[in-house]
Amino acid sequence: MKNSLLLTSALALGLASTTANAEPQAEVLHWWTSGGEAAAVKVLMEDFTANGGTWTDMPVAGGGGDAAMTALRARVLSGNAPTAVQLVGPSIQEWFEEGALANINDLAQEEDWDNLLPQPIQYHLKCDGNYCAAPVNIHRVDWIWGNSNILNDAGIEPPKTWAEFNAAAEKLQGMGILPLAHGGQAWQDATLFEAVVVGLGGPEFYKRALVDLDMDALKSDQMVEVFDQMRTLRGYVDDNFSGRDWNLATAMVINGEAAFQIMGDWAKGEFIAAGKEPGKDFTCSSPSNGAYLYNVDSFAFFNVDGEDRQAGQKLLASLTMGKNFQKVFNLNKGSIPARMDVSMDEFDSCGVQSKQDLGAAIEHNALLPSFAHGMAMRGAQAGAVTDVVTAHFNSDMSSEEAVAQLAQAVAASQ
Amino acid sequence: MTDWLEKHVPKLVLMPSLVAIFVFVYGFIGWTAYVSFTRSRLLPKYDLVGAIQYEKLATSPRWEVALTNLAIFGILFILFATVIGLILAIMLDQKIRTEGPLRTIYLYPMALSFIVTGTAWKWILNPGLGIESVFRDLGFENFTFDWLVNPDLAIYTVVIAGVWQSSGFVMALFLAGLRSVDGEIIRAAMVDGVSTPRIYMSIIIPSMAPIFLSSFIVLSHLAIKSFDLVVALTGGGPGYSTDLPATFMYAMAFSRGDIGQAASSATVMMMIVTAIVIPYLYSELRSRHD
C-alpha cells in the first residue's frame, strides 16, 4: 500500500506539474448494491477520497448488470462515458472493439501488474496487449456447499468428484433427505453445467468445448455424458425448484432442508451472514478434480476527456490493485484477492482453500474462465449455450438431442 | 386575421405532438427495421448485410417457442376474456340489487399492474405453497396442480392470470353496450313471446358487434405486448418454455448485447400487429365512405 501510495502521489504530482489543476475525478458505474457488496465498494470510495480524489458513484441495481449495461450503452453513445465501469470478461474486449476503452498500460507496467496477477487471467484485462481494466477479485464458481450436520449424520464426506456426489446423493435420497438445493434460473442451470463439463471431461475438454467452441468437442460422446449427468442431477432436486433465487436455495442448505448446493463462493456470504462457520456448520469442496473455474470482476476504464478524469482513472486503477483494498473488499465479498501477494491470514478456511486450489490449478494449467458468468464467451454465444442447457434440464429432452441443439446453437451464434 | 387564426391555430397546436410522434414512433420504428438488416451486436452498426438476422431468427428454437406461445396465449386469452366478460356482463345486466359493488369487484383486477398479478398468481399456483398444497393439507393426497413448473403447461398459467386481470375490463365494455340496446326492440320481442336467452342470442349480442371489435383490439394488443406478466409469473418459464416475443426481444437487446436479433424480433412483432390492425383500419375507413 505504501509503495502504491508513493507512486500515485508521484503520479498526481507529475500530472499536476504539467497542468493547472488535475484533481483526480472518477465517475464509477457498478451494480454492487447489496449489503456486503456496497460496504466493499465504500472501502474503495474512502481510499480514493483520502488520496485527494472525487468519487461520483453511479450504482445501477438489478438484473445481474442488465440495467447497468443499458445505462452504459446510453452514456457511450452520447459521447460521455463513465470513467470506470464494472465489467466482466469478454465484454471488456467487446467494448474495446467499439473503440470505447482507454489504455492504462503505463501505470500497469510501473506497478508491475504482470508479476502481481496470475498469468492465466491477465488476458481478460488487456485490450490488444495493453492493460485496460483493473481486477478486483477472483471468484470461484465450482463449489459444492454442504450442511455439516446432515453429512455427519449420514456419514458422508464432502464429495470431490461427480461419482462421489452421485453416491452421496443416492444415499441421502435413501434416507429421505433432499440431496441438492437448486434454483431453476437459467444462469444457475448453466453453473451446474459447467461444473459437470470440467468435472467429467477435464480442463482440456472444457477449454475445447466452452472456450474455443470446437465443434468436435461439442458433438462428442463426452458431451453426451455431460448431459446424462445433468439428467441425473435433475433427479436430485425438489419439485419446486423452478424460478427459485440462488440465495433461497442456500437458505435451504443452511436450514438443513437440503444437503448440498452447487454455487460460486458468493454463497459463502449467506452462510456467514447466518452465523455459520466453515468447517463446523458447512463444508466447501469442489467436484472439479483440481480444475478451478473463475470469475474475475474488474473495473474497465473508458475513453474520457480531461486531465482530471484521466488522473482519476490512474488513481482508481492503482488503488484497486492496492493490497488494502484487495484484502478488505474480498473479505466482504467472499472471493479471494486477484493480487497474489496479499496475505490470507484474515480469510476463513474456504477462502484459504480457494487460494491453495488456485495455485495448484495454475501449475496444472487447469485455471479456466467460467462460461456461466460471462468469462469464457461473449454474451450472445453464452446465451445460446445457456438456452440449450436450461431447456434440457427443464424437459425430458434426450442427451443426444441436447448435443445436436448445442452444436446448432453455437454455430448460429457465431 | 382572426379567420386565418381560427382556421390554423388548431393545426399549429397539434403540430408539435404530430412531429414528435412522427419522429419518435415512426422514425424509430424505421430505425429498428434498418438495424435488423445489420450485424449489430453490442452497439448498433449501420452496414446493411441482408436478412441474416431473420434467418437466424427462423432457425432459433427459442423464437419458435416464443411464437407458438404467442399464438396459444393470444388466442386463449382473447377467447376466454371475451366469453367470461360477456357472461359477467349479461348476468350483471339482470337488474340485481348489488350490481354496483359486484361491478367494482370484477373490474378491480384491471387496476393492478401485471407485475402484481404475476407475483400473486405465482404464489397461488406454486405447488409447494399454493393451491396444490392447500388441497393436499385438506387430505387429497394425490391432488396435483403443478402447471407452473411443467414446461408443457406453464403457458396456460399465464393465460389464467391474464384472463383474471382483463375479463373485468371486457365486462365493463359489454355492460355499457348492453345498456345501450334500444329497449323498444326488446319489448317488442317479449310481446312476441321470445324467450330471454333467445333475445340475448339473436338480438342483443349481434347488435354489440362494434364492442366485440373494440375489445378484440384492446385484448390483442395487451396479448402481444405481454412482458411484465411473464417476467413476474414465470420468469420465462421452466427453461424458456413461457418465452414470448416481447421477453425474447428484451433478452436479446439488454441481457445478451445482440441488438441485431432484438431488432429483427421486434420488427416481426410489429408485422404481426400490423397484420391485425390494417384490416381493421381498412374496414373502418370503408364504412366511413358508405
Image: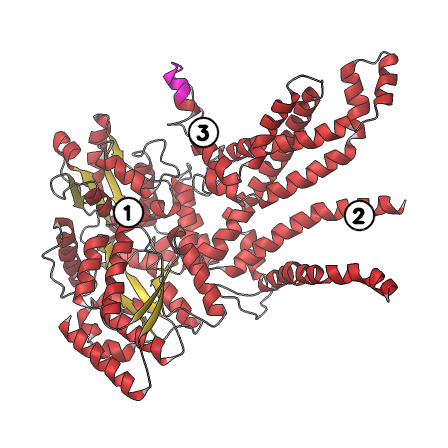
Query: Marks 1 and 2: which is nearer the front?
Result: 2
The residue that mark 3 highlights is B125
User: Which residue lies at the image location 24% right of the left edge and 83% below the top edge?
Assistant: A13
Q: Is residue B142 left or right of residue A174?
A: right
Which quadrant of the rendered structure holds the N terminus of chain A?
bottom left
Q: CA distance from mark 1 to mark 3?
A: 32 Å
Viewer-side residue, B257 vs A160: B257
In space, the residues marked 1 and 2 are separated at their CA atoms by 58 Å
Magenta stretch contains residue A205:
no
Q: Which residue has dot 2 on it?
A: B282
Q: Position of residue A401 (x, y in %)?
A: 43, 44
Dot 1 corresponds to which residue?
Answer: A196
Pick out the residue farthest to the bottom: A18
Q: Where does the magenta region start and end?
A: B134-140
Q: Quadrant of residue A168?
A: top left
The answer to whether B37 is drawn above or below residue B117 in the figure is below
SS class, disc 3: helix
- Residues A382 and B133: in front is B133
Q: Is residue A131 among the parts visible in the rendering?
A: no
Question: Vertically, is A211 above or below B118?
Answer: below
- Image quarter of residue A112: bottom left
Q: Which chain letter goes with mark 2?
A: B
